[in-house]
Amino acid sequence: MAMIAKQCPDIEVSVVDVNADRIAAWNSDRLPVYEPGLDETVRQARDRNLFFSTDVDEAIRRSTIIFISVNTPTKTFGVGAGRAANLEFVEKCARQIAEVSTGHKIVVEKSTLPVRTAAAVKRILDTSGNGGSFAVLSNPEFLAEGTAVRDLLAPDRVLIGGEDIEAVERLATIYGRWIPDERILTTNLWSSELSKLTANAFLAQRVSSINAISALCEATEADVDEVAQAVGRDSRIGSKFLKASVGFGGSCFQKDVLNLVYLCEHFGLPEVAAYWDQVVTMNNFQKGRFSKRIVETMFNTVSDKQIGVWGFAFKKDTNDTRESAAISICRDLLRERSRLKIYDPQVSERQIRQDLAAQFCGSDGSITDAGQALLDQNLEVVNSCAAAAEQSHAITVLTEWDEFQSVNLDRVFASMQRPAFLFDGRNVINRDAAVASGFEFHGIGKP
Ligand code: UDX
């Protein structure tokens, strides 16, 4: 919305949320999301034609086009628990829009939704309203975190799905202000909804594919980066998104693949469901494999050993930790009774503690006494790579932050216990330099 406001000064954009703290943060100098270039984009448009407020009803009344951009987490209860999307918030939005609207509105699904949700939204709007009329469009967002502003400025494509040609045109015209026409695709509603799930499933599949090969590389003395380069040179395959890692994270991949699995099962396609489910199984294997390797390498015990963790976000250039591989790896290491010193340049201590506390919850949903004791005694969040390394037996790199590549490894090594291990879960540290400094080095998919 900030990008639309920036590019189209004549269009008034109101961003509303029921969470007053979040809105206050959007109105402050410290935005609630860390994203390169976003501060500048918001600053240019805020209070000119971009407004943040909690007055949801007023924004609905004033707007011609309404984007529903609420979260659709994986259901944790009832039918489809663990796989289906929880559409509670989408439905609540639709009901509120229906109640408050009077004239004609274009309602755009921006949240990633299961196929045929638009039809449900349209029914709610049409049947529970106060005489308003509605066109429903699907306009999935393909930006990636960390590169959001760049992606929004020059997207590979913008996708608009809908049956109401006039409404589709209207939205296309807005994007057309800065995006070339040939990059604006229009499809039917369901193709648009399914395209988003499919794109994320394909991307996640690529990461799981290269990660599967990384396990084989470790067993065979092949080097996964060399394999990825050779494979990626095939123009039919392409070189992007072939970086072996400790496992994919983020708010979308796992959720969307599981959602696709659920849809396939629902529509009586168990083989298709099992095919996609394997992408997530592979990712869990990759995360578990990495913690196991750390323990095995360190003489089968990390109990009471200190491990420095570099990076906690699910990828670089974001403070987002949702589904970050770091969460389950740190949990595994804490269960093994190691002492962790975690450093991430953007993730707050509060967030790290909250994410890990959630891993030690009992059946009532609150943290167990044993879990709390473990976190109190064995977890420290520090302010630098050096502080995480000091007196540690090992360092593990879990996010590919640029600054990790320019760390003085000699100095880090000198401050650590011996033997000093370096487990690079992102293959960003120069192996030869690490070995020259004295480290015992272990990369992903490296001999
Ligand atoms: C993704 C999609 O890319 C985006 O189009 C969609 O709108 C939202 O979901 P995002 O989750 O922000 O975006 O990040 P992305 O760059 O796709 O990375 C996802 C995860 O995969 C990260 O944990 C990343 O580290 C990992 N990854 C990515 C790899 O391990 N290897 C790769 O080669 C690429």
Image (tube, rainbow, N blue to C red):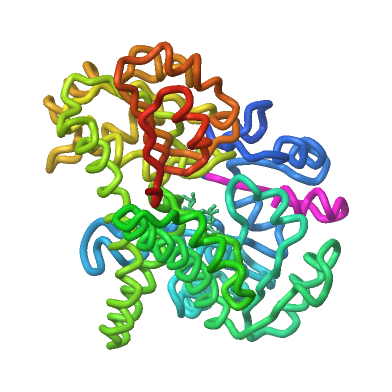
Q: Point out residue 224 in the picture as x, y percentages from the top left corner.
A: 45, 56
Q: Which residue range is magenta in the image?
A: 1-17
For the point 41% across and 19% down, the residue is 388
Residue 387 in magenta?
A: no
In the depicted view, which residue is nearer to us: 276 or 446? 446
In the depicted view, which residue is nearer to us: 429 or 4? 429
**Image-quadrant location for residue 407:** top right
For the point 63% across and 27% down, the residue is 30
Please determine whether, in this image, residue 42 is positioned above or below residue 133: above
Whether residue 71 can be seen here: no
Q: Point out residue 303 in the picture as x, y percentages from the top left corner.
A: 16, 24
Whether residue 227 can be seen here: yes
Please determine whether, in this image, residue 70 is positioned above or below residue 426: below
For the point 43% across and 12% down, the residue is 414
In the depicted view, which residue is nearer to us: 430 or 364? 430
Please determine whether, in this image, residue 422 is positioned above or below residue 267: above
For the point 77% across and 55% down, the residue is 153
